[in-house]
Image: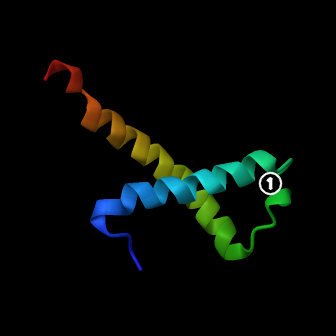
Amino acid sequence: MPSMTYCMFENTELELSQCVANMEEAKSFEDLELNKYERSAFLRMHKLCREFLAEHARLLEGMDDE
């Protein structure tokens, strides 16, 4: 079920922080012990995080000017 708009960033931040903590504990990619679906999602998340950062910068651009 998708996150409700009013809490999607909060919920996603919690889940992403759990992913990062798991990655920090791993000594190698193999240590993550991902199944084929998780592996695909792991690889797609890299692109998605880059897109998030680009949109983040775009939306915050000029915020100090207001």
Residue 9 image offset from top left, x and y in percent: 39, 55
Q: Which residue is mark 1?
A: 29
Which of 10/65 is in front?
Answer: 10
Q: Compared with residue 27, is residue 66 higher up or lower down, i.e. above or below?
A: above
Q: Residue at x 63, y 60 (%)?
A: 42
Give the camera-side residue of 60 and 49.
60
Res. 44 in view: yes
Between 53 and 64, the residue placed more toward the observer is 64
Residue closest to the eye, 65 or 39: 65
Q: Residue at x 62, y 58 (%)?
A: 43
Q: Is residue 30 left or right of residue 48?
A: right
Helix, strand or loop at label 1? It is loop
Q: Residue at x 26, y 38 (%)?
A: 59
**Residue 62 visible in the snapshot:** no
From the top left corner, tell me how far across and down residue 1 is, in percent: 42, 80
Kind of residue at badge 1: Phe
Q: Is residue 18 left or right of residue 32?
A: left
Above-or-below relation of 35 to 5:
below
